[in-house]
Image (cartoon, helix red, strand yellow):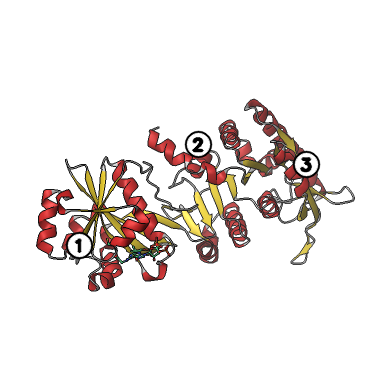
């Protein structure tokens, strides 16, 4: 790991400190050889003062028990009908998972407690079918959960609920995780299942807005496994009710949890509720969109005119700001080899996004990029936004002597008489964020 990786990771720490993550793992994951690694990852989260509530399923264990005993079960995942036999096996399977988790958590020095916090009622008669002992969450005992969390104890919640008369109900763990997350206002839900990342055709889907998630459910439902449908449905509901991020991960994969939480790209599927902003490098297919984006500013002489060929020649220097996948701004950082100097150019924020701090974010992004690549100074040439660079970015005006020779020739030839601003990059943090907010 490089030092810059560590910087990238550490930027998340203040944002996550004391926040609640609901981690929901399917029975299959609890039975996988990766469980030990996952619990170690939870220990890392705890060491960063992230509050973890662990919810588990028991479907895989229930099916194994049924096979061993030669009995039929009416449902394995806590949806549909739960008859008496199935409920008994579910209680046994759930206790076995709980025991496994408690042992594993003790091994990584984490304090944990079985949390009986789900007050459930019968799911009732659905589409004319009595679902018997299948329960739905009536209420979450948040006081007990908060008590455990305040004491630094991980509450472990099994997929069972109880009513006031001591009846037990089988509850689906996906829906339980959602209800708990809503009740405690969790920052994230992390669903860990076997093959838990969304794949559409050959494409691994990394990010989905709530609207896109609902569209996938409308259009692609028949192609998806029932477990994925359930995760997507609950993720969309969670985001609609104010939980910012839901992550769907393959819990059988080593380091999946930490890689997803602490890297910009992630390795699972993230369903997000708010605007998703990211910086990404410009590609050839973006040329037309970039030219359309800056057209007006070029016409007003705020930005210098660039032909398609000019853009193409320096395309690798261009970065795009996307908000909910729409192009909202751009910035280029040109480097002058051997000069320890970089130039911020073509900074533009679309009219509809102006005044929201994006210009400043792109300016500091350019500065961090320049610093990371070893430039000690960042230049910016502007005819109309020099105040912006000075007042909002800490640039100071310098003479044309500060320009690298080849750049000076171009500046003289252009006749634009742009003001030349410069800033030392030494103070810029060196990690370059590609995802702006969380
Ligand atoms: C300049 C520009 C990038 C600012 O983007 P933005 O997202 O609106 O900026 P932010 O939201 O981060 O900052 C807004 C602040 O900057 C100020 N600001 C915006 N444009 C400014 C300008 N040309 N001169 C001085 N200050 C300016 C705003 O008044 C506001 O001030 P406040 O926070 O005190 O209210 C954007 O207006 C733009 O694309 N302009 C046209 C292209 C251009 O001139 N680019 C620079 C040449 S490379």
SS at mark 3?
Answer: helix
> What is the crowding at mark 1: few (fewer than 14 residues within 10 Å), some, or many (at least 20)?
some
Where, quadrant-wise, is the N terminus in this rendering? top left
> What is the crowding at mark 2: few (fewer than 14 residues within 10 Å), some, or many (at least 20)?
some
Residue at the disc numbered 2? 255
The Cα–Cα distance between marks 3 and 2, rounded to whole angstroms, is 30 Å
SS at mark 1?
Answer: loop
Residue 433 percent across, percent down from the top left? 40, 48
For the point 12% across and 63% down, the residue is: 414
Q: Is residue 412 left or right of residue 9?
A: left
Residue 47 percent across, percent down from the top left? 59, 34
Mark 2, ligand 1, within 8 Å: the answer is no
Mark with earlier residue (1, 2): 2
For the point 53% across and 57% down, the residue is: 272
- Of the residues tagged 1 and 2, which is closer to the observer? 1
Residue at the disc numbered 3? 91
> What is the crowding at mark 3: few (fewer than 14 residues within 10 Å), some, or many (at least 20)?
some
Residue at the disc numbered 1? 418
Which residue is at the front of the view, 99 or 293?
293
């Amino acid at each position: 790991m490089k030092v810059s990786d560590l910087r990238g990771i550490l930027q998340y720490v203040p944002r996550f400190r004391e926040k609640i993550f609901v981690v929901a793992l399917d029975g299959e994951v609890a039975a996988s050889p990766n469980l030990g690694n996952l619990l170690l990852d939870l220990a890392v989260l705890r060491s960063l003062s992230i509050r973890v509530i662990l919810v588990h399923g028991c479907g895989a264990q229930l099916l194994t028990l049924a096979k061993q005993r030669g009995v039929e079960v009416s449902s394995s995942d806590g949806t549909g009908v739960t008859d008496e036999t199935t409920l008994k096996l579910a209680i046994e399977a759930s206790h076995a998972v709980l025991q496994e988790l408690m042992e594993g958590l003790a091994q990584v020095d984490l304090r944990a407690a079985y949390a009986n916090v789900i007050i459930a009622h019968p799911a009732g008669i659905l589409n004319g079918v009595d679902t018997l002992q299948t329960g739905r969450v009536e209420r979450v005992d948040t006081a007990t959960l908060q008590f455990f969390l305040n004491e630094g104890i991980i509450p472990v919640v099994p997929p069972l609920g109880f009513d006031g008369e001591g009846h037990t109900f089988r509850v689906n763990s996906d829906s339980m995780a959602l209800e708990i997350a809503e009740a405690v206002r969790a920052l994230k839900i992390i669903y860990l299942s076997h093959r838990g990342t969304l794949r559409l055709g050959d494409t691994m889907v990394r990010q989905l807005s709530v609207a896109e998630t609902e569209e996938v459910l409308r259009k692609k439902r028949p192609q998806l496994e029932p477990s994925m449908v359930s995760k997507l449905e609950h993720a969309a509901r969670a985001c609609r009710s104010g939980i910012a991020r839901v992550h769907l991960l393959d819990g059988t994969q080593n380091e999946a949890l930490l890689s997803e939480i602490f890297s910009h790209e992630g390795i699972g599927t993230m369903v997000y509720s708010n605007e998703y902003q990211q910086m990404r490098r410009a590609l050839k297919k973006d040329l037309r969109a970039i030219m359309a984006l800056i057209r007006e500013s070029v016409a007003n002489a705020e930005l210098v005119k660039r032909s398609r060929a000019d853009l193409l020649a320096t395309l690798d220097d261009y970065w795009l700001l996307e908000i909910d996948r729409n192009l909202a701004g751009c910035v280029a950082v040109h480097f002058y080899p051997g000069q320890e100097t970089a130039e911020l150019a073509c900074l533009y924020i679309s009219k509809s996004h102006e005044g929201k701090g994006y210009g400043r974010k792109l300016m500091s992004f350019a500065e961090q990029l320049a610093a990371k690549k070893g430039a000690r100074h960042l230049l910016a040439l502007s005819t109309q936004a020099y105040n912006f660079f000075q007042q909002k970015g800490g640039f100071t005006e310098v003479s044309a002597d500060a320009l690298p020779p080849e750049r000076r020739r171009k500046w003289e030839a252009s006749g634009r008489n742009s003001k030349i601003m410069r800033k030392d990059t030494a103070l810029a943090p060196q990690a370059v964020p590609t995802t702006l907010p969380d």
